[in-house]
Amino acid sequence: MKKLFTLVAMAFMAVGANAQTLVAERDWTGVAEYDLGFFQEGESDATYEMVADGIAITHSADMGEGKEWQPQMSVLQDFNLDIDETYKVVITAKIPADGNLQVNMGDWTTNKQYVVPVTASDDFQEIEVEFPDFPDNATGAHVLFQPGRIPGTTIVKKVQVFNMSGEPEPEPEPQGDEVVAERDWTGVAEYDLGFFQEGESDATYEMVADGIAITHSADMGEGKEWQPQMSVLQDFNLEIDETYIVVITAKIPTDGNLQVNMGDWTTNKQYVVPVTASDDFQEIEVEFPDFPDNATGAHVLFQPGRIPGTTIVKKVQVLHKGGGETGIKNVKAAKVNGARYNLAGQKVDASYKGIVIQNGKKFIQK
């Protein structure tokens, strides 16, 4: 069964036993609008656009002396660097042609830059650039990506900055997630939660052997784009300032974005997560951190308006994160004691090379 994970951009966390600390990161997958605000095309025909996999930067001409690294774009910003520390920038990108990439890091007064050779590939690759002995403290730092020596369309998917001198945080004591509420819709003959809003679409639902089948073919447009919406779990309570995880087991017909709402009719939070089509059921996890108020008789609203086709909702759970030692534990891969997963949520073993998640920590496995 596939798992999807919500990763929080710019998270600060320990990377593991190899004493590397993740200082900052940004995953550009599925981001609809570039929001870092700096793109310098030089005097070229350079352009950028947001695509499903990240930022697509297109450049065809070499600018010549003094301009040869343009275009340049900030692909990560608003983090701090300490003097005399050694950092490593890891950029996950698809490279269209062999060439040289320049990467700058720092703020606008303290800046270092290095050039690394890169090789064309039809797949994404991790490009590592080390910044030894950073020369000064930098506040509100950025990473500038400069592919002026790489003609074609480069796609930047993810950017990370590691402090190579960082000490790992102590491993937290294992603690389970308490099941607050759950509903298995397998074999249920009649929908009995009572709320289905189709908007102005051709949306319908029916009960099938595997659960609730919700069919939707048209995007509703602005203000209606998340309809239809349906309550798939209800009549449970939430507490203020607690963190909850909604786990939805569903079969997804097409790639798209799913909106999940949780709360009562006066206290409600909503989050959007990207989902990937699959012929099998997958677990979709949505974290609701620091719930803003107590909610009585709460519900989970499933809103697949951005996913045309027939979605089947099989099971819904609400977990109180770290809430107890009983009930279903270790639903999130990051909490599975001893198991290792890559960033796509696939279980890996000790032979896997790259960034893995184990026991709530990310680290580089070499």
Image (cartoon, rainbow, N blue to C red):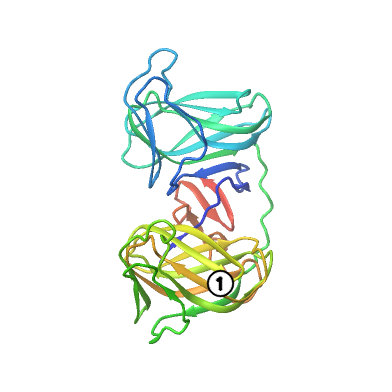
- Secondary structure beneath disc 1? strand
Residue at 66% from the left image edge and 70% from the top image edge: 323
Amino acid type at circle 1 is: Val
Residue at left 34%, top 71%?
203
150 to 204, vertically: above or below: above
Q: How many marks?
A: 1
Is 282 on the left-hand or right-hand side of 289? left
Residue drawn at 68 percent across, 29 percent down: 137
Between residues 145 and 257, which one lies in front from this camera angle? Answer: 257
Residue 226 appears in the rendering: yes
Outermost residue, top direction?
65
Of residues 218 and 313, which is closer to you in this image? Answer: 218
Quadrant of residue 146 in the image?
A: top left
Q: Residue 97: horizontal and vertical position, in percent?
A: 32, 30
Q: Quick check: 294 left or right of 44?
A: right
On the question of residue 164 being in view, the answer is no
Residue 331, percent across and down? 53, 67
Pick whichever, 326 or 35, lies toward us.
Answer: 35
> Which residue is labeled 1 in the image?
318
